[in-house]
Amino acid sequence: MSKVEFGDAIGDVALSAWQVAPGVTWVQTRNPAYARKLAKRSDARLVARGVAGGYLRTFEFIHPLSWAERLIARYTSAPMSANAGKDDGISPTPTESQENV
């Protein structure tokens, strides 16, 4: 990755991060699934919550921005949850007993 200057944001709309002070990084998400994962971390502290204009959560971590780069790469490359259902748009076909109802 290229060198990131102080105050520059990394990531995308769904999950981004920036350094607010030396060794302090804020990670922001508009995705509730990412927010749940971040909130479960023992080193996370919720610092902002959006109430207007859509879902928004910002968490503070006492880590350098390089740590956030790895976190974002790990979160965005892995499936969101092992229990998340796959929505392929195909509805189940009714069984014979359901058709006769």
Image (cartoon, grey):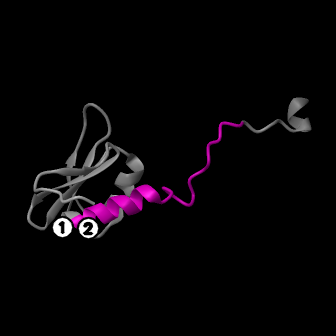
Q: Tell me which residue sits at (33%, 63%) in the image.
A: 71
Q: Tell me which residue sits at (34%, 58%) in the image.
A: 72
Q: Secondary structure at mark 2?
A: helix
Quadrant placement of the N terminus: bottom left
> Looking at the image, which residue sits at the far front?
2
Q: Tell me which residue sits at (35%, 45%) in the image.
A: 14
Q: Which amino acid, by three-letter code, is at mark 2?
A: Trp
Q: Which mark is residue 77?
A: none
Q: Position of residue 24 (x, y in %)?
A: 14, 64
For disc 2, the neighbor class at 10 Å (few under 14, some 14 to 19, many from 20) is some
For disc 1, the neighbor class at 10 Å (few under 14, some 14 to 19, many from 20) is some
Q: Which amino acid, by three-letter code, is at mark 1?
A: Pro
Q: Position of residue 23 (x, y in %)?
A: 12, 68
Most foreground residue, 90 or 12? 12
Where 43 sits versus 101, above or below?
below
Q: Position of residue 34 (x, y in %)?
A: 38, 53
Q: Secondary structure at mark 1?
A: loop
Residue under pointer 1: 64
Q: Position of residue 56 (x, y in %)?
A: 28, 43
Residue 68 lies in magenta, yes or no?
Answer: yes
- How far separated are the C-alphas under marks 2 and 1? 6 Å
The reply, left or right, for residue 81 in relation to residue 36 is: right
Most foreground residue, 65 or 41? 65
Residue under pointer 2: 67
Where 81 sits versus 31, above or below?
below
Q: Tell me which residue sits at (32%, 65%) in the image.
A: 70
Quarter holding residue 22: bottom left
Quarter holding residue 3: bottom left
Residue 73 lies in magenta, yes or no?
Answer: yes
Q: Is the C-beta separation of discs 2 and 1 under 8 Å?
A: yes
Q: Which residues are magenta?
A: 66-90
Count of numbered circles in the view = 2
